[in-house]
Image (cartoon, rainbow, N blue to C red):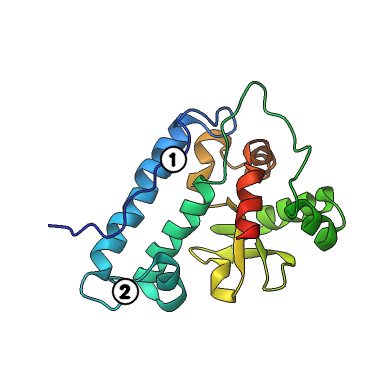
Amino acid sequence: MLTIIFSLITLPYAPDALEPVISRQTIEFHYGKHLQTYVDNLNKLIVGTEFENMPLEDIVCKSQGGIFNNAGQILNHNLYFTQFRPVTGNPSPVTDIPSPLGDAIDRSFGSFENFQKEFEQKGTTLFGSGWVWLSADKDGKLVITQETNAQNPITKGLKPLLTMDVWEHAYYLDYQNRRAAHLQSLWQIINWDEINRRYMK
């Protein structure tokens, strides 16, 4: 019998709340099946190991192989799924980023538009499967990184703030091979208050 150590996070919105940007079907597969599999796998792998009672972030920073891959994907997806807000009416473009995050974006990239362009470019050009991240260093400066497979910026001493998943299962049902269109659409559902909270934490 499987010992439940980690469990699937609860979404802060209904499965269809992100439509048309992310469909209910994608949420059901991406969250309900892919993320659940990572949770189940990690729970099996860490039983009887030094990682059994560690916080998820510590497992990601200290493990390798299958334990790292599943722990990393859980952490990545937890941050990903909890960064969105439900669509109300017609999705609208970003108009105002709360402070101090908005000020940090301007300092680090010159403008939100510059940040957005670089973020989309790095997400579009990441070869294969992985993630593009906005993170903060120890001084609060913002950086954008490309992370392959299950990697997370915390392994580099960074604080992860915002991410876009470029594994095909994150977007293929809705956008087929149009990764760039998927990335561009996600700005409409980012909960910037949550990203700002992560930055201030």
Q: Quadrant of residue 189?
A: top right
Residue that protrudes farthest toward the right in the picture: 110
Residue flagged by tag 2: what amino acid is it?
Phe
Q: In this rendering, is residue 163 above or below 175?
A: below
Q: In this rendering, is residue 109 above or below 45?
A: above
Query: Residue 137: x percent and y percent?
Result: 68, 71
Q: Quadrant of residue 155?
A: bottom right
Residue at the spot x=60%, y=47% of the render?
A: 194
Per the image, label 2 sits on a secondary structure element best described as loop
**Closer-to-camera residue (148/2):** 2
Residue flagged by tag 1: what amino acid is it?
Leu
Can see residue 185?
yes
Can see residue 133?
no
Q: In this rendering, is residue 193 above or below 198?
A: above
Residue that protrudes farthest toward the top in the picture: 89
Where is mark 2, residue-wise? Answer: 51
**Closer-to-camera residue (26/10):** 10
Query: Residue 16: x percent and y percent?
Result: 48, 28
Query: Residue 28: x percent and y percent?
Result: 40, 36
Residue at the spot x=81%, y=62% of the render?
A: 108
Where is mark 1, residue-wise? Answer: 11
Q: In this rendering, is residue 195 above or below 89?
A: below
**Left or right relative to 142: residue 86:** left
**Number of residues whose C-alpha sits closer than 10 Å to that of mark 1, classed few (under 14), some (14–19) or many (20 or more):** few
Q: Quarter of the image containing the C terminus?
A: bottom right
